[in-house]
Image (cartoon, grey):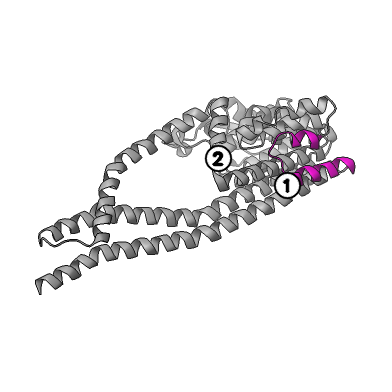
Amino acid sequence: MPYFLCRLATEEGKIITQSILAASKEECRRFFEEEGFCVLDIKKDWRKVSLFGSLSPRRVKDRDFIMVNQELMALLKAGYPVLKSLEMVRSRIKNRFLQEILSRVESEVRGGKSLSEAFTPYEQIFSKVYIASILAGEQSGNLPGTLERYVHYARTISQTKHRIRSALVYPSLLLLFSLGLMIILVSFILPRFSSFYADFEAELPLITRFIIFISGILRQLVPAALIFFILAMILIPQLRRSPAGARRVDRWKLKIPYGASLWKEQAISLFSRTLGLLLEAGIPLLHCLPIAIQAVPNKFLAHSMQSVPEDIKNGQSLSDSLNRTGFFSALAVDMIRIGETSANLPGMLRETADVYDERIKSRIETLVNLIEPVIIIFMGVLVAIMLLSVYLPIFNIIRITR
């Protein structure tokens, strides 16, 4: 969607120029005429045409989308109409892709559609949870309150993701640095030292011979490992495009010893928080469940929950049905059962999500606290072995020459 540069005349006779994002010149003209301006000229704003715009990733950051909804919620609470609120929010957005979407949504709302209907074509970008929340807010007549709950939900999910990424950055950098150091020493430095020692016809120490032997094996394995890594980077995204392939890949991920429990607890947390949000918005349980199941990031675990709506239709309780999936822990099932018996299911689902968010945070901190000293010790031992393998032959050569 392009930008258009419009020359406008105000009621006082002043000439102003304004750039606007719109689908066509006719839409620009209609928008400014409704605002009371006299449109003198409309042309494409080439200053805002990016040469690499088509190559840039078309995605919306969580932070930007949360900010948009927070501003929209504040304007609706202040009494502004939906259309005017969308226009004011869109005018302050810097993300080009998000601005284009909101411009289309604004056009659809101006054409008579509801906000949820206007956002429906973009549910793959904003998630079905967001569309369902808006629909519930419109039906209940409390759209600002529903948006406020969604903002809190989205912020909590975003903070959890950010916490996981941030916690794993430092150990990952240490691991990559140690592997890079080992590859450099084994592949480049030690082979040169070995040829240097061979000129003196001196017998190398056992540790040096062992490291040289390992370096020879690694030099042979590195090309194969690179080819395997490149193939995995190409094939895994291709495999994940089909539902069966995505389930297979996510099932392999669950075989990782420490990661399996982390992914299962994340699934419990996201499902509980999403279902609680939708129930609080007034959506019936059977309509909420498919959306909440789609919020589970691991496709294998989400597939194992497909029978839950059918079980509830057949008269089973939510807690019993979730217990049959095999990955909901006894604690989560008991908390949900308490919510069912106390008629406070949304509240207990939120409490369940909070409990598992804290458990995830604790697991990540424990993992980081364990990985950091292990990697540091590994790097220290690696450097010590390398130094010994290099300097011991030098001492032997000095002793022989004397």
Q: On the rendered structure, is 153 left or right of 258?
A: right
Q: Quadrant of residue 251?
A: top right
From this view, report whether residue 119 is shown above or below residue 333.
Answer: above
- Residue occupying image coordinates x 71% and y 29%: 109
* Position in image of residue 278 (x %, y %): 77, 37
User: Can you identify the residue that label 1 sits on?
Assistant: 353
Whole-number angstrom distance, CA of label 1 to CA of label 2: 24 Å
235 inside magenta stretch: no
Which label belongs to residue 107? none
* Position in image of residue 168 (x %, y %): 52, 53
Q: Quadrant of residue 100?
A: top right
> Dot 2: few (<14), some (14–19), or many (≥20) neighbours within 10 Å?
few
Boundaries of the magenta span: 318-343
Q: On the rendered structure, is 153 left or right of 8?
A: right
Task: Say whether disc 1 or disc 2 marks the residue closer to the N-terminus.
Answer: 2
> Dot 1: few (<14), some (14–19), or many (≥20) neighbours within 10 Å?
many
> Which quadrant: the C terminus?
bottom left
Q: Nearer the viewer, residue 285 or 306?
A: 306
User: Can you identify the residue that label 2 sits on?
Assistant: 255
Helix, strand, or loop for circle 1? Answer: helix
Total numbered labels: 2
Q: On the rendered structure, is 385 left or right of 248?
A: left
Q: Nearer the viewer, residue 263 or 32?
A: 263
Q: Are marks 1 and 2 in contact (CB under 8 Å)?
A: no
Q: Quadrant of residue 260?
A: top right
Helix, strand, or loop for circle 2? Answer: loop
The disc labelled 1 sits on which kind of residue?
A: Ala
The disc labelled 2 sits on which kind of residue?
A: Lys
- Residue occupying image coordinates x 33% and y 56%: 181
> Which quadrant: the N terminus?
top right
